[in-house]
Image (cartoon, grey):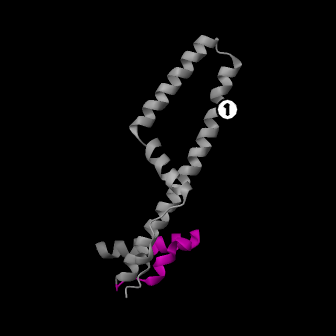
Amino acid sequence: MDDRPTKRLRGRHRPFAVVAKAMVAVTGSGWAVALIVAVVAAWLTAGFALGFSRGWELSMTAGVPVVTLGLLVVVQHTQNHDNLALQLKLDELIRAHGGTEDHMMRVEDASRDDLERLEGEFKARADEARR
Protein backbone atom coordinates (compact mmCIF):
# COMPACT_ATOMS: atom_id res chain seq x y z
CA MET A 1 0.00 0.00 0.00
CA ASP A 2 1.25 3.47 -0.90
CA ASP A 3 1.13 5.63 2.25
CA ARG A 4 2.60 8.84 0.82
CA PRO A 5 0.68 11.93 2.00
CA THR A 6 0.18 13.21 -1.55
CA LYS A 7 -1.82 10.09 -2.43
CA ARG A 8 -4.50 11.25 0.01
CA LEU A 9 -5.02 14.66 -1.61
CA ARG A 10 -8.66 15.18 -2.43
CA GLY A 11 -8.29 18.06 -4.88
CA ARG A 12 -11.41 19.77 -3.56
CA HIS A 13 -11.24 23.40 -2.49
CA ARG A 14 -13.52 25.37 -0.24
CA PRO A 15 -15.91 27.67 -2.12
CA PHE A 16 -13.98 30.81 -1.13
CA ALA A 17 -10.74 29.31 -2.47
CA VAL A 18 -12.38 28.50 -5.80
CA VAL A 19 -13.82 32.01 -6.13
CA ALA A 20 -10.53 33.60 -4.99
CA LYS A 21 -8.49 31.70 -7.58
CA ALA A 22 -10.95 32.64 -10.32
CA MET A 23 -10.93 36.30 -9.26
CA VAL A 24 -7.13 36.42 -9.24
CA ALA A 25 -7.03 34.89 -12.72
CA VAL A 26 -9.58 37.37 -14.06
CA THR A 27 -8.20 40.47 -12.36
CA GLY A 28 -4.70 39.64 -13.56
CA SER A 29 -5.72 39.50 -17.20
CA GLY A 30 -5.59 42.05 -19.99
CA TRP A 31 -9.38 42.14 -19.97
CA ALA A 32 -9.29 43.55 -16.44
CA VAL A 33 -7.13 46.46 -17.60
CA ALA A 34 -9.53 47.13 -20.46
CA LEU A 35 -12.47 47.01 -18.04
CA ILE A 36 -10.78 49.48 -15.68
CA VAL A 37 -10.12 51.88 -18.55
CA ALA A 38 -13.76 51.57 -19.66
CA VAL A 39 -15.08 52.14 -16.12
CA VAL A 40 -12.90 55.22 -15.63
CA ALA A 41 -13.99 56.57 -19.03
CA ALA A 42 -17.66 55.99 -18.12
CA TRP A 43 -17.09 57.60 -14.71
CA LEU A 44 -15.53 60.70 -16.33
CA THR A 45 -18.34 60.87 -18.89
CA ALA A 46 -20.90 60.69 -16.08
CA GLY A 47 -18.97 63.43 -14.30
CA PHE A 48 -19.28 65.74 -17.28
CA ALA A 49 -23.01 64.92 -17.58
CA LEU A 50 -23.66 65.49 -13.85
CA GLY A 51 -21.54 68.61 -13.59
CA PHE A 52 -18.97 66.85 -11.37
CA SER A 53 -21.37 66.66 -8.44
CA ARG A 54 -20.38 65.63 -4.94
CA GLY A 55 -22.15 62.26 -5.37
CA TRP A 56 -20.18 61.62 -8.54
CA GLU A 57 -16.93 62.32 -6.70
CA LEU A 58 -17.87 60.15 -3.72
CA SER A 59 -18.79 57.23 -5.96
CA MET A 60 -15.15 56.77 -6.89
CA THR A 61 -13.43 57.96 -3.73
CA ALA A 62 -15.54 55.64 -1.56
CA GLY A 63 -15.85 52.72 -3.95
CA VAL A 64 -12.25 52.24 -5.03
CA PRO A 65 -10.79 51.63 -1.54
CA VAL A 66 -13.49 49.06 -0.80
CA VAL A 67 -12.82 47.18 -4.04
CA THR A 68 -9.06 47.43 -3.44
CA LEU A 69 -9.37 45.99 0.06
CA GLY A 70 -11.52 43.14 -1.22
CA LEU A 71 -9.02 42.29 -3.94
CA LEU A 72 -6.18 42.49 -1.44
CA VAL A 73 -7.85 39.85 0.72
CA VAL A 74 -8.49 37.61 -2.30
CA VAL A 75 -4.95 37.93 -3.65
CA GLN A 76 -3.41 37.36 -0.20
CA HIS A 77 -5.51 34.22 0.30
CA THR A 78 -4.35 32.84 -3.04
CA GLN A 79 -0.74 33.83 -2.34
CA ASN A 80 -0.82 32.08 1.05
CA HIS A 81 -2.17 28.91 -0.57
CA ASP A 82 0.42 28.95 -3.35
CA ASN A 83 3.23 29.71 -0.89
CA LEU A 84 2.26 26.78 1.32
CA ALA A 85 2.10 24.44 -1.68
CA LEU A 86 5.54 25.62 -2.80
CA GLN A 87 6.99 25.12 0.70
CA LEU A 88 5.61 21.59 0.78
CA LYS A 89 7.15 20.81 -2.60
CA LEU A 90 10.51 22.12 -1.42
CA ASP A 91 10.18 20.13 1.81
CA GLU A 92 9.59 16.98 -0.22
CA LEU A 93 12.68 17.65 -2.34
CA ILE A 94 14.78 18.22 0.77
CA ARG A 95 13.41 15.05 2.38
CA ALA A 96 14.01 12.95 -0.72
CA HIS A 97 17.58 14.12 -1.33
CA GLY A 98 20.04 12.27 0.86
CA GLY A 99 22.71 14.97 1.16
CA THR A 100 20.50 17.73 2.52
CA GLU A 101 19.85 18.91 6.04
CA ASP A 102 16.35 17.83 7.07
CA HIS A 103 15.96 20.73 9.51
CA MET A 104 15.84 23.03 6.45
CA MET A 105 12.36 21.66 5.75
CA ARG A 106 10.82 24.10 8.26
CA VAL A 107 13.28 26.97 7.94
CA GLU A 108 10.44 29.40 7.16
CA ASP A 109 9.45 29.11 10.83
CA ALA A 110 12.84 30.45 11.97
CA SER A 111 13.30 33.95 13.39
CA ARG A 112 14.57 36.77 11.22
CA ASP A 113 17.92 36.69 13.05
CA ASP A 114 18.30 32.96 12.42
CA LEU A 115 17.48 33.42 8.73
CA GLU A 116 20.04 36.20 8.37
CA ARG A 117 22.67 34.06 10.13
CA LEU A 118 21.87 31.13 7.86
CA GLU A 119 22.02 33.37 4.79
CA GLY A 120 25.47 34.52 5.86
CA GLU A 121 26.63 30.92 6.26
CA PHE A 122 25.31 29.99 2.81
CA LYS A 123 26.96 33.03 1.23
CA ALA A 124 30.25 32.05 2.86
CA ARG A 125 29.87 28.48 1.51
CA ALA A 126 29.13 29.83 -1.97
CA ASP A 127 32.14 32.16 -1.87
CA GLU A 128 34.31 29.27 -0.71
CA ALA A 129 33.01 27.04 -3.49
CA ARG A 130 33.77 29.71 -6.11
CA ARG A 131 37.44 29.84 -5.07
Quarter of the view holding residue 130: bottom left
Binning the other alpha carbons within 10 Å of mark 1 as few (below 14), some (14 to 19) or many (20 upward) gives few
Vertical position of residue 7 compared to residue 43: above or below:
below
Give the residue at the far bottom of this rendering.
Answer: 1
Quadrant of the frame with the C terminus? bottom left
Q: Is the magenta stretch mostly helix, strand or loop?
A: helix
Query: In the rendering, at what x and y percent does residue 66 appear?
Result: 64, 39
- Find disc 1 in the rendering and name its residue: 62
Q: Residue furthest right?
A: 54
57 horizontally vs 100: left or right:
right
Name the residue rendered at 37%, 76% in the picture: 93
The range drawn in magenta is 98-121
Determine if the magenta segment contains residue 118: yes
Q: Indicate whether 31 appears above or below 77.
A: above
Residue 4 is inside the magenta segment: no
Q: Residue at x 57, y 68 (%)?
A: 112
